[in-house]
Image (cartoon, rainbow, N blue to C red):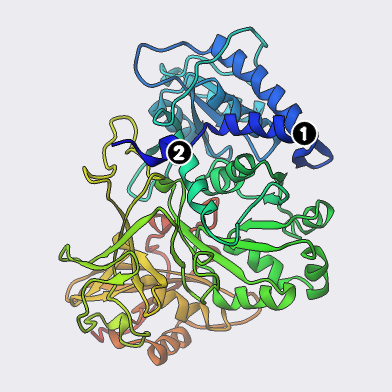
Amino acid sequence: MQDPADSFAPHLADRLRRAAADHGDRPAVHWREATLTWSELDDRVTAVARAMAATVPAGDGGPPARVAIALPNTPDFVVAFLATLRAGLVAVPVNPGYTGRELRHVLADSGAALLLATEEVRERVGRGGDELPALTAVHTTLPEEPGEPPTAQPADLAALLYTSGTEGRPKGAMLPHRALAANHDQLARIQPPVLGADDTVLLALPLFHAYGLNSGLGAVVHHGATGVLVDELGPDCALDEITRHRVSVLVGVPSMFQAWSAAAPDTVAAAMASVRLAVCGAAPLDPATAARFTEATGHPVHVGYGLTETAPVLTSTLVGGEPKPGSIGRPLPGVALRLVGADGVDLWRDGVPVADEEADDPFLADSSPGTDPGQIVVRGANLFTGYWPDGRGGPDADGWWATGDIAYADADGDLFLVDRLGELILVNGFNVYPHEVELVLDAHPGVAGSAVLGVPHPRTGETVRAYVVPVPGHPVTGAELLAHCARNLARFKCPTAVEFVDELPYSAIGKVRKTQLRPVPAARPTEVPDVH
């Protein structure tokens, strides 16, 4: 059966050509003092695509050659990415802030034939480059040689996006052209429309990440809108750029909304005068931060949820129309979503509870009526085809893919993310969701940030350990935080140790990398006696 996306999903580079034909003299991207119109962008993309087609080896009948792109949020990234697609090659966006070792892993694993990068990144990769027989060429500029690139099909591989590597080294999610385009079609079915050609979109999220790449840049190209590239957020978190270019759509992460909500209300209100829509994703948004932003700007913050493997959006509060504090919304049109219990039985499917049993999980005992927590399992045209190079870990024979995230649905059908399946803590057989404990810790006035994980315990199997960043100038002790948790959490959920740290390890889009948190032998964390 033909995938429904195949009938509507042109190449993103074809969308670029359409925008150039429809309104070529309008701005496609602003960056600092430079502006590229759609016609100028289309011409540059064509020239680089031809050079790529003449430079990169054609291959031996396998997947098209891979092109690694390690560039910041500049017009060079935009041109490189779209030219790679137009050349019928596979884009491999890479974090330019990676160390040489990390860069070499992605380049070797993907078998990249070409690297488009700054000179500084090229030199960083060059050290130890002899370990990379798969890396055949490193270029920062390309000769404009003739050559017409092949036409890519919707099912062809468009991009390899490397995950953050929570299970070890990063692995490449294989996204075909169909998946990238399908996510825009799904979002376009929301009413009122999320984005249109008249919008100006803030492109401050890293373009090497699925969220910034497809929900940001891809959406601008798909709709023929205008993007405002920001490669350095700065202390004002791009407020000047938002004001200067009259940005109408904000696509951000929690740290950006925290910075905006903490700025002077008059300054924020003036900068956001042109904004009509604010969307946040990638990590949970503190409801208090959303409320402060709304109070300052008059705009609610809509929250979305998704993964690299889903190109990336799966749910959004835009679907229901009104954001509900703490909710990730409802599935996009065209996305089928189930909540599956630990026994493999569906708890909820496409907005309808499947099992109406009494909640047996302590986390839900204090929550509004709804389902028990279950793993999110999804199906849709926006899903990846598996991990590079053999497609392992992709959707099953019926198209379903288990995300590894746990959520529950309330009585209205709105979804609430609980935690990652692999981060669930089992204390004497009871489920402890780290996010719930972190919310309690973060509510203490002396806590600037926290991360919770399970550590082995000889009697209870696991116990809860908290890592806390204290608020500067606000002394707080571990004993105070343990008492605070005891007042707000069931006994088995409370941390038994608190360790203070100067900062938490964050990914480029603001997720805490818990795999990098390990007990430090020399540290003296506050501990409590065995109370479980």
Mark closer to the chain start, 2 or 1 = 1
Q: Is residue 525 visible?
A: no
- Residue beneath label 2, please? 161
Quadrant where the C terminus sits is bottom left
Callout 2: helix, strand or loop?
Answer: strand
Could you say which is closer to the camera, residue 154 or residue 74? 154
Q: Is residue 73 left or right of residue 310?
A: right
Quadrant where the N terminus sits is top left
- Residue beneath label 1, please? 37
Q: Is residue 31 left or right of residue 364?
A: right
**Which three-letter amino acid code belongs to the residue tagged 1?**
Thr
- Mark 2 residue crowding within 10 angstroms, few (<14) / some (14–19) / many (20+): many
Task: Please identify the quarter of the rendering in which residue 479 is found.
Answer: bottom left
Could you say which is closer to the camera, residue 287 or residue 25? 25
User: In this rendering, which labeled residue sits more in front, label 2 or label 1?
Assistant: 1
Say if 172 sits above or below 257 in the image.
above
Q: Position of residue 231 (x, y in %)?
A: 69, 44
Say if 401 sits above or below 520 in the image.
above
Please tell me which residue is depicted at 78% across the width and 68% down the height of the picture.
268
Question: Disc 2 vs disc 1: Cβ atoms closer than 8 Å?
Answer: no
Q: Could you tell me how far apart the alpha carbons at marks 2 and 1 are, in whole angstroms?
A: 28 Å
**Which three-letter amino acid code belongs to the residue tagged 2?**
Leu
Say if 517 sits above or below 202 in the image.
below
Q: Position of residue 467 (x, y in %)?
A: 44, 70
Callout 1: helix, strand or loop?
Answer: strand
Q: Position of residue 456 (x, y in %)?
A: 24, 67
Task: Please identify the quarter of the rendering in which residue 243 is found.
Answer: bottom right
Q: Is residue 463 left or right of residue 220?
A: left
Please tell me which residue is depicted at 80% across the width and 65% down the height of the picture.
273
Could you say which is closer to the camera, residue 25 or residue 347? 25
Say if 373 sits above or below 531 in the image.
above
Q: Is residue 235 left or right of residue 148?
A: right
